Image (cartoon, rainbow, N blue to C red):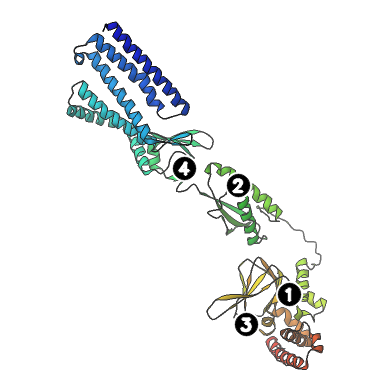
């Protein structure tokens, strides 16, 4: 075949293959396929070097190509780029998987870069030994000496590479995780030989050398799960009942978008500070990128919820009060206490003025949910009237198990026998929710019994009439004679105990 015709066929074949690989590369580019890089390498370098080598061999040294320097250089380059392309095809095909419309690498980029480098170096040694006739032993010795020199010259760079390899195998974080390194917090967008690229919340790109990551304490907010805890310390007034504050805060947490239901959020009383009671609110979020937005929404809603529920978020202030010397007035709380006492049967014999005087000597007590008001078997000399809330009456048996026997609501009372006779408590009373009670002490009733000798008799009859199932003492008039006699005997015995207890 004529030489010119043979060269034309080589060029035509090169042109045809170039067009084919160009079309394939464009199709891969459109799909963002990882094989587009090695495909472009074949089209641009491998085919061109192959054409150059074939043409040079045909023109320069058709008989003894290995003796010509130019041909040996071209052959070496052709083998190197061919090995690089083959390694690219192999590693991308084996390590990339498709997820929907995207291609995801199964292994970190740094590991793949190291693998490709090793394969290319091994291929280069084989090519040099084959094309240039060099002894691999001498070549490896030369590479060893060169490596020592380069290692000393590139000590810092190699430090970054080695730490990068350690990070790669330990896998403390991956691309897409939110991490904190020292004082820097951001999202990992790339890991390479020398550094980790982090994008901060201010959208700045920070390049952190691997050696720094190896020395600093690293916190991964995306591991072991994406659930991340947020904690807030919020103060409320000492006048606000803690259980009410907790209910309001828990409602705000559950209504905030982005807060996870599991793990469950928690609200705890943390400190009794100088100006407020401090509550710690802890909840979990999954999207750390929205951390600031979620916290902003939560803290904003706390203010509105506190306003709606009459809660006060205090701040350090100094208040001055001017005293004008007016006679103190009975506060509304005392009036409520007097109204509550008037509904208790044992205090029915008292006049309105006496009730008001008794209310002035009583006190109001607040109990939180689950708090025990009285314990079965304890000694006592006080009586309780429920002003707000609900309480449970329960009995404890010999096996220390507790069973509910009644519930007390507003206006109901307990402990009248302890007040009148000092008897031990016959049951447990526990607050169901926030409970407010009026407490009548023995000392408050002492003076009234001393002023009105007949009052003790009336109270004894009322207590015994209620024990017999009668609503009032006047019902004794229509009760059977046997019942009237039983009530009178019991009332007499109770009167003796009352007088003994109060020293009358």
Label 1, secondary structure: give it: helix
Q: Nearer the viewer, residue 182 or 290?
A: 290
Find numbered disc 4 in the image and state the secondary structure of the residue it sits on.
strand
Q: Is residue 415 left or right of residue 25?
A: right
In the image, residue 457 above or below residue 25: below
In the picture, measured across the screen, residue 339 lies left or right of residue 434, that is right
Q: Residue shown at 73%/82% (left/top)?
A: 446
Q: Which residue position holds label 2?
A: 257
- Residue lying at 75% horizontally and 91% vertically, measured from the top left: 483
Residue count near mark 4 (Cα–Cα under 10 Å), binned few <14, some 14–19, many ≥20: some
Within 10 Å of disc 3 (Cα), the crowding (few <14, some 14-19, many 20+) is some
**Image point (57%, 43%), residue name:** 292
User: Which quarter of the rendered picture does the N terminus lie within?
Assistant: top left
Secondary element type, mark 2: loop
Residue most extreme to the front: 1
In this view, the residue in front, 463 or 68, is: 68
Local packing at callout 1 (Cα closer than 10 Å; few below 14, some 14-19, many 20+) is some
Q: Are marks 2 and 3 in contact (CB under 8 Å)?
A: no
What is the CA distance from the residue labelled 2 to the residue labelled 4?
A: 25 Å
Mark whose residue sits in front, 1 or 2: 2
Which label sits in the foreground, 2 or 4?
2
Tell me whether circle 2 and circle 4 mark residues in contact (CB < 8 Å). Answer: no
Label disc, if present, on residue 424 of the rendered structure: 3
Q: Comparing marks 4 and 1, which lies closer to the viewer?
A: 4
Residue 140 falls in image quadrant: top left
* Residue 149 visible somewhere in the drawing: no
Mark in the foreground, 2 or 3: 2
- Of the 4 image quadrants, the one containing the C terminus is bottom right
Residue that carries the numbered disc 4 in the rendered image: 180
| Pick the front one: 89 or 241 | 89
**Which residue lies under the disc numbered 1?**
361
Image position of 402 (left or right of 336): left
């Amino acid at each position: 075949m004529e030489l010119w015709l043979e060269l034309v066929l080589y060029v035509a074949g090169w042109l045809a293959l170039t067009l084919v690989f160009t079309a394939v590369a464009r199709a891969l580019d459109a799909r963002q396929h990882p094989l587009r890089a090695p495909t472009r390498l074949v089209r641009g370098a491998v085919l061109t070097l192959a054409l150059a080598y074939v043409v040079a061999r045909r023109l320069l040294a058709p008989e003894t190509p290995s003796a010509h320097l130019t041909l040996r250089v071209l052959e070496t380059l052709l083998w190197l780029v061919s090995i690089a392309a083959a390694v690219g095809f192999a590693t991308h095909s084996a390590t990339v998987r498709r997820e929907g419309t995207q291609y995801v690498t199964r292994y970190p980029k740094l590991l793949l870069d190291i693998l490709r480098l090793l394969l290319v170096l091994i291929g280069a040694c084989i090519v040099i030994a084959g094309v240039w006739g060099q002894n691999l032993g001498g070549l490896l010795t030369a590479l060893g000496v060169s490596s020592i020199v380069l290692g000393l010259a590139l000590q810092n760079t190699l430090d970054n590479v080695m730490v990068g390899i350690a990070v790669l195998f330990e896998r403390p974080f991956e691309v897409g995780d939110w991490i904190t390194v020292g004082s820097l917090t951001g999202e990992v967008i790339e890991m390479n030989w020398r550094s980790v690229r982090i994008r901060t919340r201010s959208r700045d790109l920070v390049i952190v050398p691997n050696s720094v990551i190896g020395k600093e304490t690293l916190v991964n907010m995306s591991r072991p799960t994406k659930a991340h805890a947020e904690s807030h310390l919020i103060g409320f007034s000492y006048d606000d009942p803690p259980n009410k504050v907790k209910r309001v805060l828990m409602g705000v947490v559950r209504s905030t978008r982005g807060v996870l239901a599991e793990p469950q959020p928690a609200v705890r009383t943390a400190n009794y500070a100088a100006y407020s009671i401090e509550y710690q609110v802890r909840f979990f979020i999954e999207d750390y990128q929205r951390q600031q937005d979620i916290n902003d929404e939560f803290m904003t809603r706390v203010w509105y919820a506190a306003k709606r529920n009459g809660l006060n978020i205090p701040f350090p202030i100094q208040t001055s009060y001017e005293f004008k010397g007016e006679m103190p007035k009975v506060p509304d709380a005392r009036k409520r206490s007097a109204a509550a006492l008037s509904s208790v049967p044992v205090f029915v014999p008292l006049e309105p003025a006496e009730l008001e005087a008794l209310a002035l000597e009583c006190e109001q007590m607040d109990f939180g949910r689950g708090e025990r008001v009285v314990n079965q078997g304890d000694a006592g000399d006080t009586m309780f009237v429920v002003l707000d809330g609900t309480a449970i009456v329960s009995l404890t048996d010999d096996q220390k198990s507790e069973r509910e026997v009644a519930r007390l609501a507003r206006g109901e009372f307990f402990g009248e026998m302890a007040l009148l006779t000092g008897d031990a408590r016959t049951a447990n009373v526990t607050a169901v929710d926030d409970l407010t009670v009026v407490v009548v002490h023995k000392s408050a009733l002492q003076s009234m019994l001393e002023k009105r000798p007949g009052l003790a008799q009336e109270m004894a009859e009322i207590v015994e009439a209620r024990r017999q199932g009668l609503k009032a003492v006047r019902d004794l008039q229509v009760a059977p004679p046997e019942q009237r006699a039983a009530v009178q005997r019991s009332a007499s015995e109770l009167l003796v105990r009352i007088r003994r207890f109060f020293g009358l």
